[in-house]
Image: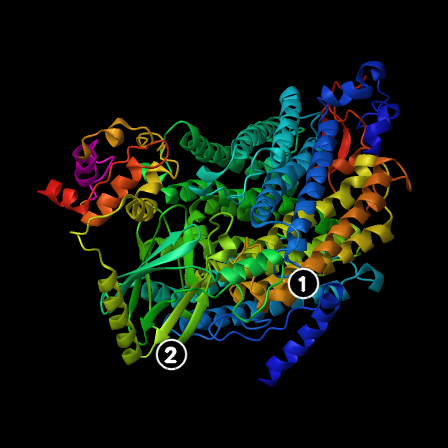
Amino acid sequence: MSAVIGHSGHGGTVDAAGHEHAHEEHHGAPHGWKRWVYATNHKDIGTMYLVFSFTMFLFGGVLALGIRTELFHPGLQFVNPQLFNQLTTMHGLIMVFGAIMPGFVGFANWLVPLMIGAPDMAFARMNNLSFWLLIPAAIMLAGSFLMPGGAPAAGWTIYAPLTLQMGPSMDAAIFALHILGASSIMGSINIIVTILNMRAPGMTLMKMPLFCWTWLITAYLLIAVMPVLAGAITMTLTDRHFGTTFFNPGGGGDPVMYQHIFWFFGHPEVYIMILPAFGIISAIIPAFARKRLFGYTSMVYATASIAILSFIVWAHHMFTTGMPVTGQLFFMYATMLIAVPTGVKVFNWIATMWRGSMTFETPMLWAVGFIFVFTMGGFTGLILAMAPIDIQLQDTYYVVAHFHYVLVAGSLFAMFGGVYYWGPKWTGVMYRESAGKFHFWTSLVFFNVTFFPMHFLGLAGMPRRYADYPLQFTDFNMLASIGAFGFGLSQVYFLFAVVLPMMRGKGAIAPQQPWEAAEGLEWEVPSPAPFHTFETPPQLNAAGTKIIGAAAGSAH
Amino acid sequence: MTMRAFTRRALGLAALAAASFAAAAPAVRDLKGGPAVNQLNLPPAVTQIAEDQQWLHHFMLIVCLVIFIAVFGVMFYSIFKHRKSLGARAAHFHESTTVEIAWTIVPFIIVILMALPATKVVVAMKDTSAADLTVKATGLQWKWGYDYLSGEGAGIGFLSTLDVAQREASDRGAPEGDDYLLRVDNPLVVPVNKKVRVILTAADVIHAWGVPSLGVKQDAIPGFVRDTWFRATEPGNYYGQCYELCGKEHAYMPIHVKVLAQQDYTAWASQKVKEAAAKADDPSKVWELAPLVARGEQVYSANCQVCHQANGQGGGNIKPLDASPTVLDADKTKQIHVVLNGQGGGAMPSWKQLSDTEIAAVVTFTKNHWSNATGQIVQPSEVAAARK
């Protein structure tokens, strides 16, 4: 982003504590392509992650619009059923592994060192590798459309034994997922080591901003479950090519075992995609309520509880596979239990707002929008957790509505809020408030126009991943398609009215502290954040939110 | 009803804008036992389980609505009152263990209260014992096979496929009819007020058999057997679709359950049993090559293809049949022996349960398909001899 593209002039001139910096020559940002290819600076890598994730988001969005175009009207008009299945599969894979997950890693790269007063991520070169691994994986994934037989068409969950019928693109996707998994694991190790070892003196764990906490827990989840996914898809690969029959009933394999392994990864994955969002919201709400976050400690414990519970609920994705009564009951109870810590989080946010002194700049709008719409997704989650109701709703559009309420209105809205909130710090440029508000309101309205009718379609029994449908479902599908195009266009508006101007440095200059009451070390450094920050550990106030001087011996 | 008419009109207006973009939406009416136009809720229940599911759903909706109003009432009150622009000054409280414990325990209790009625329904749903009629449903790419295993009509079996005209209409982009994509050639026929146990499996990939009005949905998994049940309380036609992504034609393998009054069912079943008996093979018949190969192809795709593949190449420890020495051997008894008794310690199972005609047909088929061109014909009598 701008700062980023042309800020070598600012870089290194003033360090965090305000000292003239002696080593500008050595510490300024490198120039040209080498700066990005050899990047070891957490801010540059963070920027690349965010740009990558937004690119994949637009690509995945185009695939979604392909789906909605075909479903606008019953009958096949634009794509054949095989291509339709490819679109749904690739939309899911790209949004989950290409857009949401790298997006949050981008936030972590930019913010974790700034928030804890560290000079950079712990393993700078591994950080570079974990970003650049994304590129071949993304190319392989997107390029699979051009392979014989087209892209994988077995759904983003790539259930066996349908995967055995896929063409060579399935192998490309498996390889891509392996690489993405390796990248995620490296990123997680980096984040954990950075948070545990590189906090400034006085920044105790329980003083860290909640965003660091949620990412710390997320990173552990990633390390725990990415290898599980790798195992599942490796077994799929050997089933496909090397004559094993892990999941192939033709040789005594068990297709349901694949689902157990996949969802043992897949359910924690859901929380991997939402916990950092909780962290972002927990930063924004107090800043614009001008009041400290209510119940910080309980927020940390609630996050940890959600993470632990996420390991024992996986089979609620499988109620229709035919589990014994006790299995269904156990997974139903465990799933419903997750509502408790999630509820605690929502209550804490509202208690933070209560008797605050609120203003509603764009980041706050996204945060409040997040709470409102995400909670609706939470309610439908509770309804789906009830095994008897899930029998009716499993694999219908109700499920599609539910997970878009938590993934789009949850993860994505939180990231948008984060971009508006920290964007001025990243780029040194303020976005236009009117543009931000327009983006928010159009996104919110069109999101609901798209996904709310899907609840009705699901209750009426319309199965998901259908290229064509009975005529009774026509009106709601039309409505959803119109909403989807509106939502897509408002993201194009976001690109041209917010992202590009900020990256090109066009707009009002952002002050060091653009928000009246935002707290945290990231607001203690100038805007845009200099290329190097906290090269010497800062001395913090008691709350760990302000710099009161450099540590002894750090003056140049 | 007026409420329903009202919502429908409102939705109609909303959809009007949509409709004006495309060609006018095809005229369609509610399908009884299937989806209604712009249906907003679960369909009318025809089984006790479906009724319980609806009750639970409404119960959950009410509880969630109450929580929704309480939580967001507070939030929006705060949003409108505690604004800087109204002169609100921020309070300083930021912690209260009492409050945290309270809002952990209260949701916990609510969750338990929700789980109790659901538990009862789960237990009832899973009780497939003491069925009056047992039907096996087999998911195939992309149709359903039904075999009546026990109860009145045992022995009946047929395939159920989407109406070809509807499939073509889909390709043309010209859908029409209230039962678009739901009309099949042979519906599953069952008697009213009888406990019907449906046993599910699949021949290729995972499918899912679900009928919303009956409150059932169960995955059909290749290599495994699962079951579910329903007891329909009203005669009529009930529709469902495949609910697990199963490949290209996933949207085109609907389910149609026809529930008949007891005497109508009895009449239908005895008619079907008679037809089946008339079609049964005479084991002493002497076959020509072509019809026997055609018959064998059906047997092959129903029983052998899962492992040996359509191309006869097998895979892994499944031996290829194409160019197999056993298949090509001039001594026909060698292959008949393998099919009857299995080999490789069960890797190739025994197929004794197939009829002499079926085994004769499938052996003849493999001997005269792919690159195999032996010209050999195996007659049912030869299989009967090999059984001894």
Magenta stretch?
A: B333-351
Task: Check the image and name the residue furthest to the left.
Answer: B388
The numbered mark at residue B234 is 2
Which picture quadrant has residue B158?
bottom left
In the displayed structure, B366 sits above or below A351; it is above
Quadrant of the drawing holding the N terminus of chain A: top right
**Toward the viewer: A148 or A307?**
A148
Is any atom of residue B101 visible in this view? yes
Q: Position of residue A410 (x, y in %)?
A: 64, 51
Q: Is residue B379 left or right of residue A191?
A: left
Other residues around mark 1 within 10 Å, as few (<14) / some (14–19) / many (≥20): many
Q: Is residue B344 magenta?
A: yes
Residue type, mark 1 in image: Met
Q: Position of residue B44 (x, y in %)?
A: 47, 75
> Which residue is label 1 attached to?
A478
Residue type, mark 2 in image: Glu
Which residue is depicted at the point 77% across and 58% down?
A441
Q: Is residue A30 left or right of residue A164?
A: right
* Co-location on one chain, circles 2 and 1: no
Other residues around mark 2 within 10 Å, as few (<14) / some (14–19) / many (≥20): some
